[in-house]
Image (cartoon, helix red, strand yellow):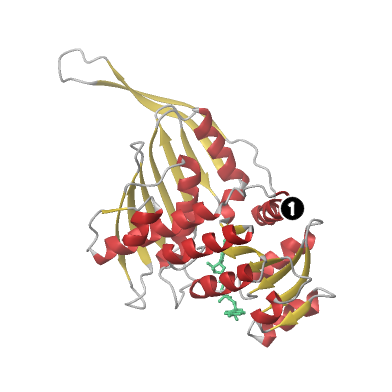
Amino acid sequence: MRVGVVGLGYWGPNLVRNLHQLPEADVVAVCDTRPAALDAIIGRYAGVRGTDSLDALVSDDSVEAVVIATPVSTHHRLALAALLAGKHVFVEKPLAASSLEATELIEAARRGGLVLMPGHTFLYSPSVNLIRDLIRSGDLGEIYFLSTSRVNLGLHQTDVSVVWDLAPHDFSILHYWLEEMPTTVAAVSRGCIIPEIPDVAFINLAFPSGAVAHVELSWLAPGKLRRTAVVGSEKMVVYDDTSNEPVRIFDSGVMPRNPETFGEYQLSYRTGDVVSPRVEATEPLALEMLDFCTAVRLGSQPAASAELGRDVVRMVEAVDRSLAAAGAPVPVAVSGAVADVL
Ligand SMILES: NC(=O)c1ccc[n+]([C@@H]2O[C@H](COP(=O)([O-])OP(=O)(O)OC[C@H]3O[C@@H](n4cnc5c(N)ncnc54)[C@H](O)[C@@H]3O)[C@@H](O)[C@H]2O)c1
């Protein structure tokens, strides 16, 4: 698949490197408005053409697919131009800056018979997939709750809040694991450094299955945490993306025994084995780019579907509505019609 990559800032060069290493893909052109970013890539990969114009890239007949890693505010305009020019599109998370924009992209891809895939990298993490299998197989039992921390010192963004920057990771993982949308979201946040741009957020989500989740996000923290705990009725799991034992399964729980007298509960706590399964070391980005190539070649549905990408945007929009309502719980739209009205 002959690919053009747009946006060569912090993240784009990682996509170029992974595409370059895939036998299924050939990076033929790159595009950025900054000449220095273009020069750095052209100097590293022989034979790659460079341009500062998206129009030039999408009118190049040798380009079959466009991979976009530009700021969120540009995703809709650039992705739509590529789709209208008949190119398959991969666009970094979040898919678009609103669910309306996401719907327009999905419609354009459908009309053109083209693949539209959002960049939810964590869906290609072997750890995330291992935990998904544990949840699906019933090994963890009923999922009671999930608690996740994604905090770090930096990088403060100037165009989006910490919610638009980091929540798409946790929201895509929750959606992928639980296979349901939350019914309500409640959030508080604060712009500690730049008052109008929240750099810390605490988000609570309630799901139809009864599962509840807490998501903590921040660019202002003493250290890096990428930790998620999943607590089920049978077992508990801790996923720590910074650890060399990223998944630990705890055979722990609590059993209510039959009450001896009415209203009196006898609880028995169980702390069993802790298992740390071997997790494949494959780079998620390589698997993600391969899934994009496969979707284009075979017409298969990528694990990160455009609809999942739009659902993630809807969850982020619900957080913004809750923030605007002083942290009140707000409903999350699940159908296109409701989403577009809210
Ligand atoms: N999947 C992940 O784990 C992950 C990680 C980091 C960033 N991202 C996503 O990648 C995207 C880019 O983030 P970043 O941190 O690399 O941003 P960045 O600001 O470092 O880079 C963006 C690049 O896009 C270029 N650009 C902007 N408008 C352009 C246009 N109209 N045409 C051509 N080039 C243009 C800029 O010159 C810059 O080089 C965002 O959507 C972000 O959410 C994803």
In the picture as drawn, the residue positioned furthest to the front comes out as: 111
Judge whether 50 appears above or below 25 on screen: below
Q: Residue at image x 71%, y 77%?
A: 59
On the image, which quarter does residue 24 sit in? Answer: bottom right
Residue occupying the far bottom of the picture: 35
**Residue sitting nearer the eye, 341 or 255:** 341
Furthest residue toward right: 46
Is 325 or 1 nearer to us in this picture?
A: 1
Q: Amino acid at mark 1?
A: Arg
- Residue 73 x, y percent position in the rendering: 48, 74
Residue 11 placed where, x, y %? 61, 69
Which residue carries the number 1 mark?
297
Residue drawn at x 65%, y 74% is 6
Q: Going by the picture, which residue comes out furthest to the top?
A: 260
Label 1, residues with CA under 10 Å away: few <14, some 14-19, many ≥20 = few
Percent across and percent down for residue 16 are 71, 67
Report helix, strand or loop for mark 1.
helix
